[in-house]
Image: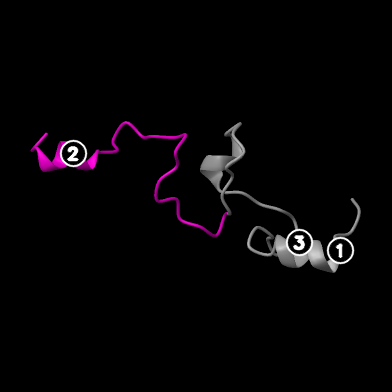
């Protein structure tokens, strides 16, 4: 595997693990979409993925 340039390493630093490999979140790893998130981030809301337990704000406001 070729080495990353310094510029690319700085650009991808949020996604690099301790072995300098680009690593995505577990939920995003199997996703085919291009909106991958870092393993360091906590997914608040993914526009492509909705859990069945996830509640809409409108539903909780109406008592559902």
Q: Is residue 5 left or right of residue 54?
A: right
**Which residue is painted at 58% across and 54% down in the image?**
38
Q: Residue 24, position in %: x, y?
A: 61, 49
**Which residue is painted at 44% across and 35% down in the image?**
49
Q: Is residue 63 magenta?
A: yes
Residue designated by label 3 = 20
Q: Residue 56 versus residue 20: which sits nearer the camera?
A: 56
**Which residue is painted at 36% across and 34% down in the image?**
51
| Quadrant in which the C terminus is drawn | top left
Q: Are marks 1 and 2 in contact (CB under 8 Å)?
A: no
Q: What stretch is highlighted in magenta?
A: 39-64
**Which residue is painted at 65% across and 58% down in the image?**
15
Residue designated by label 1 = 5
Q: Do the residues labelled 1 and 3 touch (CB within 8 Å)?
A: no
Q: What element carries label 3?
A: loop
Whole-Å distance between the Cαs marked 1 and 2? 47 Å
Q: Is mark 2 on a helix, strand or loop?
A: helix
Residue designated by label 2 = 58
């Amino acid at each position: 595997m070729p080495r990353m340039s310094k510029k690319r390493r700085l650009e991808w630093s949020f996604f690099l693990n301790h072995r300098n490999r680009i690593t995505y979140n577990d939920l995003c790893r199997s996703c085919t979409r291009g909106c991958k998130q870092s393993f360091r981030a906590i997914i608040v809301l993914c526009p492509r993925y909705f859990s069945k337990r996830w509640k809409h704000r409108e539903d909780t406001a109406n008592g559902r």
